[in-house]
């Protein structure tokens, strides 16, 4: 029985100077189609939203073709699908009692399948509003060991529907190439191709803790720097002079750059940890569902969590690693050893299971639960009946194969040697 593995590789495109405007014009019309579809399909709260691509195509495809006559027909279809898929996700969130709004599209992102693009190992030919444009890949001199070598240039992987993006800061175009490969469900190789690193984010102590026991950054230090910054800004604001006003803005810019760089280093360590353990996925808790944890300085903490996850996602994508979010419910209360879920299991930073007496750092325990949640989701999502049997999550010095029943039935692939509640490493800060 076969199953599919997909890896995403980010590669810079060498777009001819006289054709760059054609890609920008193509994106404008692509986003126009997506926004027009969203406007038509979004009916909340008066009616049910339209989430069917075929229904949307039947209603507005011909109009969109006339309104964007130079846009490739397949790109019109892909824009319609993007909008209806996003609205479908919004409907699910509304059903769960969450707040959401109509999707809007204003960034550069075009979806290309093999009808609108021709993919090669060294270049791609893209449909635009003004004929096709051929763009060579900017590949490393020695691609061995890189995502380019492992997936993009690997004949075992085929190109699937991919996306083209534009980085306005760098003034560069990028292809996010989706590379697919079929594997035998009974092959041990599958275990290597579905491995999750769980990450638990925190408002105090360490910024993040991984399921492999890596303690990253220092949230207390970050919060202290924020408080000192706010004190100085408040003092400058009270002074009221022009000089103080100018300094006020300089201090704000300086702290913004410092904190962004601090989180950049943390995110780099998280992705490196995933690479060290051969992980294909990184799991975070869904930010929208953990607001109740954040009290003091909540806006700053929400920004910090979101910035960290976005930076991890950006860096992980370059390495062919997928970042996904999971429901955070009970990750801090459940024992990652036996599955017993009690609020009393956790006391601050210490976790001690009242059922099996398993004792460990509370955030490490939570990170393992986060990893298992995504691993179980991946297992259930496999089309093969045996699909989930080899889905794994990474631990401190080993890996576990998830079982669909309960935590205690998961199978160790190699022994995990627990330490106590002390960090194995602190990547950033002290």
Image: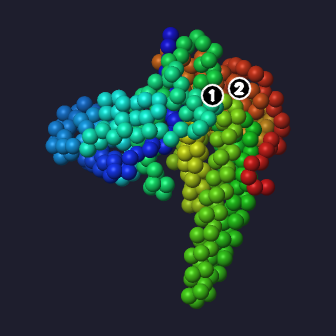
Q: Quarter-wise, where is residue 316 in the image? A: top right
Whole-percent x, y for residue 390 in the image: 61, 19
Q: Position of residue 296 (x, y in %)?
A: 63, 61
User: Residue shown at 80%/35% (left/top)?
Assistant: 359
Question: Residue 115 in the image: x percent, y percent?
Answer: 31, 29
Q: CA distance from mark 2 to mark 1?
A: 8 Å
Q: Is residue 389 left or right of residue 80?
A: right
Residue sticking out furthest to the bottom: 241
Identity of the residue drawn at 56% across and 57% down: 303
Q: To which quarter of the image does residue 239 belong?
A: bottom right
- In the rendering, at what x and y percent does residue 307 appear? 57, 53
Residue name at image x 62 percent, y 76 percent:
233
Residue 109 can be seen, yes or no: yes
Left or right, 148 with respect to 91, comes to right
Mark identifier at residue 384: none
Q: Which residue: 33% across, 48% down?
A: 19
- Closer to the chain start, of discs 2 and 1, is 1
Is 119 positioned to the left or the right of 9 in the image?
left
Q: Nearer the viewer, residue 222 or 354?
A: 222
Residue 362 visible to an observer of this rendering: no
Residue at the spot of label 2: 399
Number of dots carrying numbers: 2
Q: Relative to 306, say whether 396 is above or below.
A: above
* Looking at the image, residue 258 lies above or below residue 167: below
Instruction: Look at the numbered disc 2 and give the secondary structure of its residue.
Output: strand
Are the residues at dot 2 and dot 1 in contact (C-beta closer than 8 Å)?
A: yes
Instruction: Tell me the quarter of the image containing the C terminus.
Output: bottom right
Kindly state the secondary structure of the residue where label 1 is placed: strand
């Amino acid at each position: 029985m076969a199953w599919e593995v997909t890896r995403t590789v980010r590669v810079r495109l060498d777009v001819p100077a006289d054709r760059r405007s054609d890609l920008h014009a193509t994106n404008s019309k692509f986003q126009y189609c997506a926004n027009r579809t969203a406007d038509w399909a979004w009916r909340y709260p008066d009616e049910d939203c339209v989430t069917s691509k075929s229904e949307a195509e039947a209603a507005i495809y011909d109009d969109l073709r006339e309104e964007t006559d130079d846009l490739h027909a397949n790109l019109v279809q892909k824009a319609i699908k993007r909008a209806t898929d996003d609205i479908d996700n919004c409907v699910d969130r509304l059903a769960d009692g969450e707040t959401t709004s109509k999707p809007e599209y204003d960034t550069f992102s075009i979806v290309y399948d093999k009808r609108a693009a021709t993919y090669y190992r060294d270049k791609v030919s893209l449909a635009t509003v003004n004929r096709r444009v051929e763009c060579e890949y900017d590949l490393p001199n020695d691609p061995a060991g890189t995502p380019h070598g492992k997936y993009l240039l690997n004949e075992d992987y085929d190109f699937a529907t991919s996306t083209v993006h534009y980085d306005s800061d760098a003034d560069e175009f990028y292809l996010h190439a989706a590379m697919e490969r079929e594997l035998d469900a009974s092959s041990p190789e599958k275990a290597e191709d579905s491995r999750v690193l769980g990450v638990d984010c925190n408002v105090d102590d360490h910024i993040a803790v991984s399921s492999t026991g890596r303690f990253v950054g220092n949230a207390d230090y970050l919060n202290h720097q924020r408080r000192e910054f706010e004190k100085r800004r408040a003092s400058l604001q009270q002074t009221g002079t022009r000089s103080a006003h100018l300094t006020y803005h300089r201090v704000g810019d300086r702290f913004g750059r410092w904190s962004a760089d601090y989180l950049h280093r943390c995110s780099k360590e998280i992705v490196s940890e995933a690479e060290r353990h051969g992980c294909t996925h990184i799991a975070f808790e869904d930010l929208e569902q953990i607001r109740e944890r954040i009290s003091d300085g909540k806006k700053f903490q929400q920004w910090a969590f979101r910035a960290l996850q976005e930076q991890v996602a950006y860096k992980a994508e370059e390495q062919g690693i997928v970042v996904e979010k999971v429901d955070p419910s009970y990750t801090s209360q459940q024992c990652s050893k036996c599955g017993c879920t009690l609020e009393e299991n956790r006391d601050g930073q210490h976790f001690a299971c009242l059922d099996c007496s398993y004792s460990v750092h509370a955030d490490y325990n939570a990170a393992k639960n986060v990893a298992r949640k995504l691993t179980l989701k991946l297992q259930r999502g496999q089309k093969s009946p045996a699909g989930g049997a080899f889905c794994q999550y990474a631990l401190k010095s080993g890996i576990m194969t998830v079982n669909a029943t309960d935590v205690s039935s998961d199978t160790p692939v190699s022994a995990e040697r627990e330490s106590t509640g002390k960090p194995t490493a602190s990547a950033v800060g002290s």
